[in-house]
Image: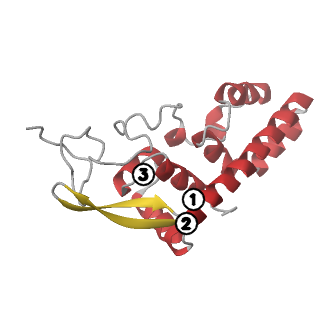
Amino acid sequence: MEQEPNDVIVLSAILRGAKKFDKIAKVTKISSSELNDILQRLENRELIVLTEKKGFFGPKKELNLTEKGSKELEERKFELEKNWNNMVTVWKSGDKQKLQQYMNDNRSVIPSMMFLGIMDIMMFSTMMGFMGMAMSSFIPDTQMYGDSHMSDTGHDTGGSDYSGGDMGHGDGGSGDMGGFDVNF
């Protein structure tokens, strides 16, 4: 997965409770076609599994990490933490060119570090200012979200997803597309 930084973002989103395609797409800001490819790749590698649960309006499907997927995510988090620590060390050395080169060499994993909460965004902002650059040079605008990037998916914080994020007022079923639920 070294060359696939979005894979780790998707695994993390699933671990945090985004268990349906639409929720994963919303949280990760990954296009539907790319997300579909990523999910297929993760399933082929046996890192995720599609499970069916009983729901109020019939069965509903959700994605879960396998044991292998959880282990892979932990290993990737560890690698990203080391990468971030190296970046901080280079920044503290005061060598702008070396920092810029390091960031250019690791450009693809910077959004992953941000999504997983590994990167201290204030420190990263300071690094960018040190080099006279904008954060958008390394992080796409679609990925510029704070620590609350999961907050807009209801109270879906990694526990069981009973209601598709609507706080128990309806199941949504297997075709839940994140639309409106009527609360009777």
Label 1 to label 3, Cα distance in Å?
Answer: 12 Å
Label 1 to label 2, Cα distance in Å?
Answer: 10 Å
**In the structure shown, which secondary structural element does the residue marked by tag 2 occupy?**
loop
Q: Residue 24 carries which label?
A: 3
Residue behind mark 1: 7
Q: Where is residue 161 in the image (x, y as percent from the top left)?
A: 34, 48
Q: Where is residue 113 in the image (x, y as percent from the top left)?
A: 65, 43
The numbered mark, 1 or 2, whose residue comes first in the sequence reads 1
* Label 1–label 2 contact, CB within 8 A: yes
Q: In which quarter of the image is the N terminus?
A: bottom right
Can residue 94 be seen in this snapshot?
no
Say what amino acid the circle numbered 2 marks: Leu
Q: Is residue 73 left or right of residue 162?
A: right
Q: Which residue is drawn at 26% across and 53% down?
A: 177
Residue behind mark 2: 47
Q: Is residue 67 left or right of residue 37?
A: right
Q: Residue at x 51, y 64 (%)?
A: 38
Q: Which residue is drawn at 49% across and 42% down?
A: 142
In this view, the residue in front, 131 or 37, is 37
Q: Quadrant of residue 155?
A: top left
Mark 1 crowd level (few <14, some 14–19, many ≥20, 10 Å Cα): many
**In the structure shown, which secondary structural element does the residue marked by tag 3 occupy?**
helix
The numbered mark, 1 or 3, whose residue comes first in the sequence reads 1
Say what amino acid the circle numbered 3 marks: Ile
